[in-house]
Amino acid sequence: MNKPTAQPTAANDGLSGDLAAKAAAVARRMAELRAALAAAEEAVAAARRLTHEAQVREAMVRVDLTQAITEALVGRAELAARQRAQAVRAYFGETEQGRPRRRNRIGRRLDAILARLTSLGRALVIARAGVWRPSGRPLYDLRHMAAYARRGADPSVQPPAPFEQAWYLATYPDVAASGRAPLLHYLLAGAAEDRTPHRLFDAAWYRRENAQALAASGQSSFEHFASRGAAEGRNPHPLFDMAHYASQAPALLAGEDMLSHYLREGWTRDLSPHPLFDPAWYRGQAPDAADVPPLVHYVLEGWRAGLSPHPLFDVTWYLARSPDVVEAGREPLAHFLDVGAAEGRSPGPWFDLPHYVAVRGGALATGTNPLIDYLQGGAWAVTEARPGFPTAAYLAACPGLVREGLTPLEHWARRSAG
């Protein structure tokens, strides 16, 4: 017997219609979601493209800006070099030089005879040496010299010469005991005995550096420096650079030598005596030396205590790698300037001297100290002053060093030192 066939009803039709409508709605929603997702993906892709383009533009701007800053720094270094040269020409061109004189055995014997006479005879000894800063009034100067000779071993008196009277008397008690005026003692005996007239005058070094001029004059190192050498820009000490000091335009007294100016006031104004001596940096290591000229403190005791004269010259590091310098008892910065750099020795852990010399190539002038060259403009002429230390990248990361007037390696060394 056959089952009856189900007949469509209004209820079934309604249910089918609802399902179809819902399915269609879901389909539409899915399509909308897919479209929204595709739009979102496109938007993300577009944002990524924009971000990448912005990053590329920013990188290009950074490169252009860094290049522009570097070019400006090169220009600043060149301008500073011209200003240094101009200041040196102005000072040494206007400084009156002493009259050339020839000292010989007869002259020395005459000095000995004059010294046994009155104070006028002793004044003539000083005048003949040419070490007294002239006032432009010869008779006044001669009377002044005679009065000085009469004062004898008085530490409160300072003759107008690059001679440290109080220090000389304190260093050589026999001179103080003799009662003789210290400058007169030095001219008659001290120079021959290789005594030191000034803490920043290295007679042996000056003699070696100016052998030909001294041979022609017959003068002692100090006589030559005081009468002619200072006016000619000859350095009195390996760490006192006359041209560098003159470039800072100190207000010198009429005819005053730079050594006297430095001890009188230059050090209190933070004037630097040498490109590789940073007074502020040095004082930061030696707060107990606040009342002493920094270079004097360094030369007499600071280097032995491991104090460094410049962020890029590490005394302890240099001596640890130079046993010959330790054995000789030499002050390390003077050694570096004299022979160390020429031998390819680096001044510290931050500055790789052989690498710098190689990358600087022919642009490094013959006889120029590589570290000084770096500090005075070479820093901006090389891509890497040290292997793995790109100049442009460091400048981009630390643009503040421009305001501070520092080179990248100086900045890095200072930060590393805390």
Image (cartoon, helix red, strand yellow):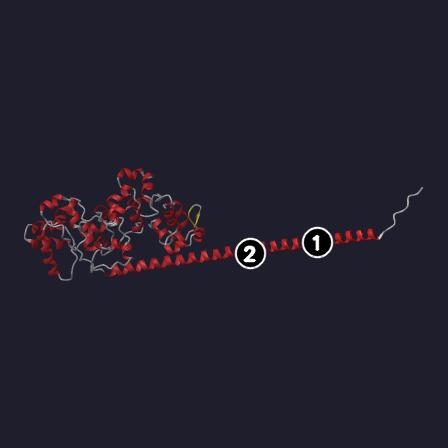
Image mark for residue 192: none
Label 1 crowd bin: few (<14), some (14–19), many (20+), radius 10 Å: few
Residue type at the position of mark 2: Glu
Mark 2 closeness class: few <14, some 14–19, many ≥20 residues within 10 Å = few
Q: In which quadrant will I find the N terminus?
A: top right
The tag earlier along the polypeptide, 2 or 1, is 1
Q: Contact (CB < 8 A) between labels 2 and 1?
A: no
Q: Nearer the viewer, mark 2 or mark 1?
A: 1
Foreground residue among 391 and 283: 283
From the image, tell me which residue sits under label 2: 53
Which type of secondary structure does the marked residue at label 1 adopt?
helix
Residue 30 versus residue 393: which sits nearer the camera? Answer: 30
Who's the residue at 11% across and 56% down the image?
145
Mark drawn on residue 29: 1
Residue 62 image offset from top left, x and y in percent: 48, 56
**Residue extending farthest left:** 117
